[in-house]
């Protein structure tokens, strides 16, 4: 979302100009030290490892194995950077993993430690599991959100390990054994909101990079252990959000550059189908060719087929393009029609006997209690008909900074079945985990909405209970209190869903 700056901010600019400097984290003495570690599901038996370093690594490698003292395998990748970045982004893919097994890994460096992860569940594994959802998360600390959301008090927070004090990141750390992976559909660190800290004003190019370094450092305790699946939001697009001005941004801070460098080699494309149906295999193969990670892609995990879409560019009137509503000058990233052709082939390929649940995550919603200002009609026009046609079970969005749950709905009409085997997708907004712009009021438009919460920071968890039951929970981040819970029942009788 976009927010107005306060008068208090204006006054603090005057005070800050004398001491302007970006809040870069310290550069380690050993420049091979891995920072900002993140892993992702990158294939049915693959985990990718991404990390940054303050030097280019000639041969970036990860050693791994199923015992901490026997890291018998090695995977290597590439080390890249872009104009305006202080760091190199490294990536390697760990393939041929045994399913749902604990692996230990060590990024090869003269200063690194052994971490661990659980490898992905195979498509069709019916073991229940929980997937957490954060959207619009944002950096914590001087450049980010504060616990009381009072921007003038930003500098009064005592120094503590920031990665464990962001209310939502702390909760994700405290409950790390409860969930198996995280999806984050857009608005990641809020680097383009550097202006909210008045001290950044004379050094905005460095401030943008410093926020990225801070945010991914804060996230690392979580993302180095749990797969973190990211997709784009408007805050990844350019160096600031003022419409029509992207062209003044420094090289490297336009057109989703950091997002692409950081996640382009580590997000999956789409999985080959394990269905016995040959047309499903052909569709899955088509989807794989049309996928464009990290912008749009899919993966399968146990009972779930998860698709991540790009609500910013690459469809008619997409908002983050030069001519779109936000005028951020980004994209396109694929050929004309490629993203929607991907989505259609991908959804058509899903064999519900293998992965009964189909979830789509994207950034901008088309159902929100906030009214017409923060819903994306071009997104609805592009995506909603495909969601209905192929029986998407749940649509997960953010952009609006609060938590909301809707009835299953299509074309703004609630499905008469409610949560009892509806044909229309159930929608949710999970945009409340905390960022420098603060929470958004829940608004007045309650059409088809059943839960809305903006009193404090919150996040969501989706539990795949069995082939027919999926639980959606919203939690208050600071206390872990359960705010809302619901169970969606789907019969999932058709092997391939095709609805008129
Ligand atoms: C080694 O890594 C640790 C943890 O990331 C860091 O705090 C320390 O500064 C590094 N040491 C050197 C010599 O770079
Ligand atoms: C953050 O850390 C400070 C200092 O340790 C503590 O007083 C505060 O309660 C913490 N906040 C949260 C949300 O954990
Ligand atoms: C394979 O799946 C398609 C839908 O994608 C369906 O029309 C066709 O009947 C299926 N074939 C078999 C042999 O089940
Ligand atoms: C953004 O990047 C993509 C991929 O590199 C490129 O095809 C596109 O032309 C770029 N858009 C702009 C406005 O530079
Ligand atoms: C309220 O939301 C519905 C969709 O649920 C939308 O069609 C309608 O335009 C919205 N009304 C206002 C006043 O924003
Ligand atoms: C579902 O919504 C789309 C608009 O997004 C509409 O074109 C279509 O007719 C609706 N389908 C049904 C069955 O109501």
Image: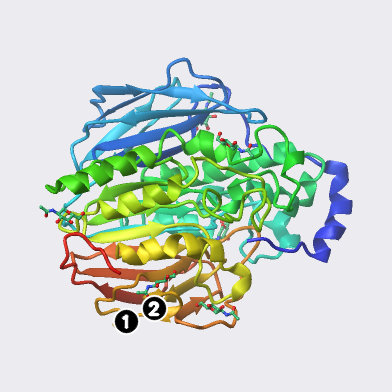
* Above/below status of 339 relative to 438: above
Q: Is label 1 within 8 A of ligand 6 (CB to nearest ligand atom)?
A: no
Q: In this view of the protein, can residue 301 be seen by the observer?
A: yes
Q: Secondary structure at mark 2?
A: loop
Between the residue at mark 1 and the residue at mark 2, the CA separation in whole angstroms equals 6 Å
Residue 60 occupies which quadrant of the picture? Answer: top left
> Residue 398: where, in percent of width, then height?
51, 62
Tell me whether the residue at label 1 lies in contact with that at label 2, contact meaning CB atoms closer than 8 angstroms: yes
- SS label for mark 1: loop
Identify the image quadrant of residue 120: top left
The numbered disc on residue 181 is none
Q: Which residue position holds label 2?
A: 407
Q: Position of residue 411 (x, y in %)?
A: 44, 74
- Residue 264 in the figure: left or right of residue 188: left
Q: Residue at 67% of width from left, 52% of height from top?
A: 323
Check disc 1: other Cα within 10 Å, few if <14, some if 14-19, many if 20+: some
Image position, residue 432 (x, y; %): 53, 65
Which mark is first along the chain, 2 or 1? 2
Please count the marks in the image. 2
Q: Nearer the viewer, residue 379 or 148?
A: 379
Report the residue at 68% width, 52% height from top: 327
Left or right: 41, with 282 as reference point: right
Horizontally, residue 398 falls left or right of residue 65, namely right
Q: Is residue 456 above or below residue 272?
A: below
Identify the residue shown where x is 42% and y is 56%: 172
Given the current orientation, which residue lies at the most extreme left position? 276
- Identify residue for label 1: 418
Q: Position of residue 51 (x, y in %)?
A: 47, 32
154 vs 365, nearest the viewer: 365
Q: In the image, what residue occupies the spot 83% across and 42% down?
A: 19
Local crowd at mark 2 within 10 Å, few (<14), some, or many (≥20)?
many
């Amino acid at each position: 979302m976009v927010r107005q700056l306060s008068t208090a901010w204006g006054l603090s600019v005057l005070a800050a100009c004398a001491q302007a400097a970006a809040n870069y984290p310290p550069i380690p003495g050993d420049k091979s030290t891995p920072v900002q570690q993140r892993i992702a599901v990158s294939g049915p038996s693959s985990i990718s490892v991404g990390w940054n370093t303050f030097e280019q690594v000639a041969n970036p490698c990860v050693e791994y194995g199923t015992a901490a003292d026997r890291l018998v395998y090695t995977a290597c990748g590439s080390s890249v950077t872009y104009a305006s970045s202080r760091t190199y982004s490294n990536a390697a893919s760990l393939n041929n993993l045994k399913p749902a097994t604990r692996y230990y890994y060590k990024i090869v460096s003269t200063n690194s430690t052994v971490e661990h992860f659980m490898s992905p569940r195979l498509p069709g594994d019916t073991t229940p599991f929980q997937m957490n959802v954060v959207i619009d998360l944002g950096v914590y600390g001087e450049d980010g959100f504060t616990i009381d959301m009072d921007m003038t008090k930003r500098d009064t927070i005592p120094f503590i390990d920031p990665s464990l004090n962001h209310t939502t990141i702390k909760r994700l750390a405290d409950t790390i054994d409860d969930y198996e992976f995280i999806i984050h559909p857009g608005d990641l660190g809020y680097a383009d909101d550097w202006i909210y800290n008045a001290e950044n004003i004379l050094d905005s190019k460095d401030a943008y990079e410093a926020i990225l370094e801070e945010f991914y450092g804060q996230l690392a305790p979580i993302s180095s252990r749990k797969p973190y699946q990211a997709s784009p939001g408007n805050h990844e697009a350019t160096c600031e959000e003022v419409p029509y001005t992207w062209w003044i941004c420094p090289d490297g801070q336009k057109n989703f550059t950091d997002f692409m460098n950081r996640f382009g080699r580590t997000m999956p494309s789409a999985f080959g189908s394990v269905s016995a149906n040959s047309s499903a295999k052909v569709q899955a193969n088509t989807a794989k060719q049309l996928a464009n990670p990290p912008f749009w892609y899919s993966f399968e995990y146990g009972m779930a087929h998860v698709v991540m879409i790009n609500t910013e560019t690459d469809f008619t009137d997409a908002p983050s393009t030069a001519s779109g509503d936000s005028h951020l000058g980004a994209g396109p990233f694929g050929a004309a029609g490629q993203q929607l052709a991907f989505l259609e082939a991908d959804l058509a390929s899903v064999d519900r006997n293998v992965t009964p649940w189909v979830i789509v995550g994207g950034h901008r919603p088309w159902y929100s209690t906030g009214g017409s200002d923060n819903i994306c009609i071009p997104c609805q026009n592009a995506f909603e008909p495909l969601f209905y046609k192929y029986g998407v079970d749940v649509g997960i969005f953010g952009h609006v900074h609060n938590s909301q749950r809707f009835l299953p709905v299509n074309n703004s009409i609630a499905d008469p079945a409610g949560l009892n085997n509806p044909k229309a997708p159930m929608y949710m907004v999970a945009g409340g985990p905390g960022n420098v712009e603060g929470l958004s009021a829940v608004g007045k438009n309650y059409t088809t909405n059943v839960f809305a919460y903006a009193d404090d920071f919150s996040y969501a968890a989706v539990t795949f209970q069995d082939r027919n039951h999926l639980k959606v929970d919203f939690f208050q981040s600071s206390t872990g209190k359960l705010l809302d819970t619901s169970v969606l029942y789907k019969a999932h009788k058709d092997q391939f869903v095709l609805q008129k």
